Amino acid sequence: MSLGIPANDNIKDHIHNESSPLHKHVSKIGNRLIGVAREHCDIQLKNTKVMIQTVRSGGEIKNPNQEPIDLNQLLELEAMWARAVKRLEGKWTIV
C-alpha cells in the first residue's frame, strides 16, 4: 500500500497533517483500537459491579490464588475501571 510519502519526508509531519492519507489511515486504526479498549473496560466495569453485589449479598469472590477479595478491593477496582472508561470516552487524537 502506497501512501504517497516521499522517502526523505518526516513521517510525523504527514501523521499530523489532516489532509494526508497517512493521517486518515493512522486515525482509523487508532479509533478502532480505542473502541476495542473502551469495550473491554466497559465489560470489566460491569463484571466488577456484579462482584460487588455478590459480596454485598453475603457471597464471596476469590482471586486466582483462591484468596477471598474484600469489598474495599472491589470498590478500588470499580473506580479504576470507571476512570479507564471515562478516559476513553473522548475523541481520539494523534499526539
Image (cartoon, rainbow, N blue to C red):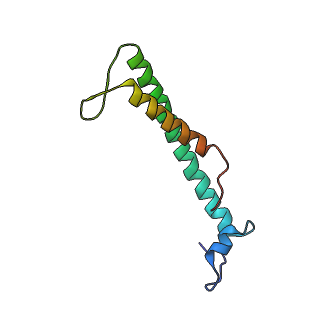
| Quadrant (top left/top right/bottom left/bottom right) for the C terminus | bottom right
Residue 75: horizontal and vertical position, in percent?
Answer: 45, 29
Pick out the residue farthest to the right: 19
Quadrant location of residue 7?
bottom right
Residue under the point 35% across and 25% down: 70
Side (left or right) of 19 relative to 93: right
Task: Name above or below for residue 3 compared with residue 86.
Answer: below
Pick out the residue farthest to the front: 72
Side (left or right) of 75 relative to 30: left
Quadrant location of residue 12?
bottom right
Residue under the point 59% across and 45% down: 88
| Quadrant (top left/top right/bottom left/bottom right) for the N terminus | bottom right
Task: Name above or below for residue 55 compared with residue 18.
Answer: above
Q: How many marks?
A: 0
Residue 77: horizontal and vertical position, in percent?
Answer: 44, 34
Pick out the residue farthest to the bottom: 8
User: Who is closer to the viewer here, 78 or 10?
Assistant: 78
Residue 18: horizontal and vertical position, in percent?
Answer: 73, 65
Task: Name above or below for residue 77 compared with residue 3.
Answer: above
User: Who is closer to the viewer here, 44 or 95?
Assistant: 95
Residue under the point 36% across and 13% down: 58
Residue 59: horizontal and vertical position, in percent?
Answer: 34, 16
